[in-house]
Image (spheres, grey):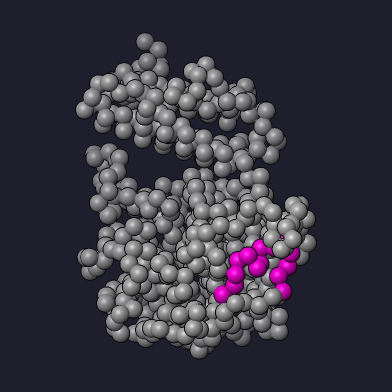
């Protein structure tokens, strides 16, 4: 018996021949990938073949037939692609095994197909896009005459249709822009379609997920407000927070609910139909970010200055379901991925963590029952790094196909895929950017002929800068979100950073703002 035959009974014990074949394919593929990475396998980077979609003898083109950029992308992300492939195929083994318990007539290609198609789509995401071009640029109205610290944009949000977006920050104004106006391929010098003034600096915005006319804000005085955009007026105000409120999020499944968090260590749930909060949770740490789950009004993720992400079932709010701990510093953002089964968290330790939250709200998960449940729930499935984030809030947004955009203190936007630890792309904010219009002809109305405008929105609450302190520390309200006001000019002159990012729903279009108050429309290009 050779070595490969010896390991098979251990790897596939209790599984029938079809799953044995599947396991062998996974094993052989991993051998190829390891050999390729070590430089001993030079012939082909081939996708496994699915009988239902391809002839069994057909193989994908050699990696050497790809353009150089695409080939480099594959080789750079080889480890991540290996992880994706292994996870997809092992999941299919489990699906196949469960199905075979009910029937013995399953065609293995029926279970292989979806996983291979998903892997192919992921591979395409890694290789088809190789740069971010500027489709539009503007400076927030009124920012030209202000001090640098007042130019910082804390939050960018698209409305439910993706037709308009809102910006806000330390200027104490919420400005609404028509997206078509600013993505014409040239610098936009016009004005917002709506402007609303706040009595205090605004830390966060959250559009209603049910109507484009409502938007919620949180501010430095702890006030949570719900605005009627069409009438430029406040329709609800909540003043229970005792310190600065960093975050607000509108519920995706209930149009009346919103959540907020504050330096007072409390998370509050509000209803627009009631004056007082409907739920008050003491997290016992400064709350930096909150987000509802995409499919449930009961699921809430909370990021805190205690370095943890707390997941709550709001039906049982006395204690968090779990505290996810991997970051070494404060958690500045939490965002659920599109599936709702995974979460990405960002921290001022310069990392992003991907967490599997599927089991927490009653879903199934494929974990070995012989291991303690907590081992799988409190360990991130992947840690992403490559950007620089030591003290500033630099923005985080999730888009279609598990793409993640975050800012950096190097004045760059970084683009990640959830399954790979290294960035796919980055874009530097500098003065010599080439606009998309210079590469593609524009229509007579000034909008690029390329389709880079479409509806839908992706949640994004972004910050300006500022070190998050523990709940024990005293923070005067005069201390700005970005930095101590007395030294703002000095720090600003030393470095610029990205302060907000937001995907335009499922489109390959991203909004990003930096600490100079410059906002760019970035288009993923092939």
Above-or-below relation of 406 to 420: below
Residue 452 falls within the magenta-colored stretch: no
Above-or-below relation of 66 to 452: above
Question: In screen coordinates, is 167 left or right of 428?
Answer: left
| Percent x, y of residue 206 | 45, 71
Q: In which quarter of the image is the C terminus?
A: top right
| Percent x, y of residue 475 | 46, 83
| 174 or 409: nearer the viewer | 174
Residue 9 in which image quadrant: top left
Question: In screen coordinates, is 263 left or right of 13?
Answer: right
| 10 or 343: nearer the viewer | 343
Question: In screen coordinates, is 125 left or right of 67?
Answer: left
Which residue is at a point 38% across and 83% down the rendered structure image?
A: 236
Residue 379 in view, yes or no? no
Which stretch appears magenta? Answer: 176-189
Residue 241 in view, yes or no? yes
| 122 or 141: nearer the viewer | 141
Q: In which quarter of the image is the N terminus?
A: top left
Q: Residue furthest front?
A: 444
Which residue is at a point 57% across and 25% down the rendered structure image?
A: 60
| Percent x, y of residue 502 | 54, 62
Which residue is at a point 36% across and 29% down the rendered structure image?
A: 111
Residue 186 falls within the magenta-colored stretch: yes
| Percent x, y of residue 231 | 49, 83
Number of numbered discs visible in the structure rendering: 0
Which residue is at a point 36% across and 72% down the rendered structure image?
A: 258
């Amino acid at each position: 018996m050779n070595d490969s035959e010896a390991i098979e009974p251990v790897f596939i014990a209790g599984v029938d021949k079809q799953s044995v074949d599947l396991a062998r394919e996974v094993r052989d593929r991993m051998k190829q990938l390891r050999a390729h990475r070590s430089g001993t396998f030079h012939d082909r980077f081939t996708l496994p073949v699915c009988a239902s979609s391809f002839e069994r003898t057909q193989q994908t083109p050699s990696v050497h037939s790809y353009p150089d950029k695409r080939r480099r992308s594959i080789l750079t992300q080889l480890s991540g692609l290996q992880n994706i492939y292994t996870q997809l195929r092992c999941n299919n083994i489990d699906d196949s095994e469960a199905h075979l318990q009910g029937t013995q007539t399953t065609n293995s290609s029926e279970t292989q197909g979806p996983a291979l198609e998903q892997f192919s789509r992921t591979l395409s995401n890694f290789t088809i896009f190789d740069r971010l071009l500027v489709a539009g640029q503007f400076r927030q109205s009124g920012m030209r005459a202000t001090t640098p610290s007042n130019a910082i944009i804390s939050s960018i949000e698209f409305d439910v249709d993706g037709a308009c977006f809102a910006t806000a920050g330390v200027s104490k104004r919420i400005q609404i822009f028509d997206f078509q106006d600013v993505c014409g391929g040239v610098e936009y010098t016009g004005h917002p379609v709506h402007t609303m003034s706040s009595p205090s600096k605004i830390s966060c915005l959250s559009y209603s997920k049910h109507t484009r006319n409502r938007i919620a804000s949180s501010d430095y005085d702890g006030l949570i407000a719900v605005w009627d955009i069409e009438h430029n007026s406040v329709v609800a105000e909540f003043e229970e927070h005792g310190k600065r409120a960093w975050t607000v999020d509108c519920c995706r499944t209930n149009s009346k609910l919103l959540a907020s968090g504050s330096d007072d260590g409390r998370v509050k749930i509000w209803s627009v139909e009631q004056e007082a909060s409907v739920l008050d949770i003491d997290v016992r740490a400064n709350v930096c970010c909150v987000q509802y789950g995409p499919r449930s009004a009961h699921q809430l993720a909370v990021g805190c200055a205690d370095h943890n992400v707390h997941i709550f079932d709001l039906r049982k709010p006395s204690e968090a379901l779990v505290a996810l701990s991997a970051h070494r510093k404060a958690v500045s953002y939490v965002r659920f991925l599109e599936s709702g089964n995974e979460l990405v968290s960002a921290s001022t330790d310069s990392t992003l963590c991907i967490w599997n939250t599927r089991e927490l709200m009653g879903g199934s998960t494929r974990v070995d029952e012989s291991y303690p449940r907590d081992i799988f729930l409190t360990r991130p499935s992947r840690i992403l790094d490559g950007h620089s984030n030591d003290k500033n809030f630099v923005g985080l947004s999730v888009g279609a196909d598990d793409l993640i955009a975050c800012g950096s203190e190097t004045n760059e936007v970084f683009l990640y895929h959830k399954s790979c630890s290294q960035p796919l792309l980055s874009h530097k904010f500098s003065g010599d950017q080439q606009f998309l219009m210079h590469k593609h002809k524009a229509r007579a109305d000034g909008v690029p002929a390329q389709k880079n405008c479409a509806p839908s929105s992706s949640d994004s609450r972004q910050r300006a800068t500022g070190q998050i302190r523990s709940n024990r520390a005293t923070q005067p309200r005069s201390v700005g979100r970005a930095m101590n006001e007395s030294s703002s000019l000095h720090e600003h002159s030393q470095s610029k950073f990205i302060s907000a990012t937001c995907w335009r729903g499922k489109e390959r279009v991203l909004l990003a703002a930096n600490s100079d108050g410059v906002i760019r429309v970035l288009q993923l290009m092939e």
